[in-house]
Image: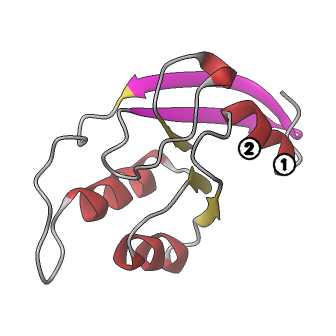
Amino acid sequence: MAFVDNNAGLDSIISPWFARAPFIAVVDTYGGRVVALNIVANPLAARAGGGPGGGGAGAAIATWIQSIGASIVIASQMGPGAASRLQSIGIRVVFKAPGTTLRQALRELGIVC
């Protein structure tokens, strides 16, 4: 799964935003190869920020990520609460520079695109 700025398939660009990225790319792999790619509009992109104790877009998106069974999240950055929550439930967080293509990020993870 990756947080991207556009819906351009594997050429989508990693967003500088995490929970407020306009799109989420859900990538299914098998045997180190991409077998399916679904890019959806981020339904939580406009969610109001949370205050002390969380409850904002980052917490909501972490819950959603867990619910779909993702094992890796690619983002350019995220708050410490979301990162800690994801890592505590066994989801690997990988940071890539904004502007990196999804294809490049996946290749750097050893996934054939």
The quarter of the picture where residue 40 lies is: top left
Label 2: which residue?
105
Question: Residue 33: within the magenta?
Answer: yes
Residue 43: give x, y in percent of width and height. 24, 35
Residue 41: give x, y in percent of width and height. 34, 26
Mark pair 1, 2: CA separation: 5 Å
User: Which region of the structure is painted magenta?
Assistant: 23-40
Q: Is residue 22 left or right of residue 9?
A: left
Quadrant (top left/top right/bottom left/bottom right) for the C terminus: top right
Q: Is residue 10 left or right of residue 42?
A: right
Q: Residue at x 85, y 41 (%)?
A: 107
Kind of residue sitting beneath label 1: Glu
Q: Residue at x 65, y 54 (%)?
A: 96
Kind of residue sitting beneath label 2: Ala
Label 1: which residue?
108
Badges 1 and 2: C-beta atoms under 8 Å apart?
yes
Q: Is residue 107 left or right of residue 52?
A: right
Q: Please identify the dominant SS of the magenta region.
A: strand
| Crowding at mark 2 (Cα within 10 Å: few <14, some 14-19, many 20+) | many
Q: Nearer the viewer, residue 98 or 46?
A: 98
Check the image and report above or below for 107 versus 82.
above
| Crowding at mark 1 (Cα within 10 Å: few <14, some 14-19, many 20+) | few
Check the image and report above or below for 58 versus 35.
below
The quarter of the picture where residue 111 lies is: top right
Q: Residue at x 41, y 78 (%)?
A: 80
Q: In what element is the residue under mark 1?
A: helix
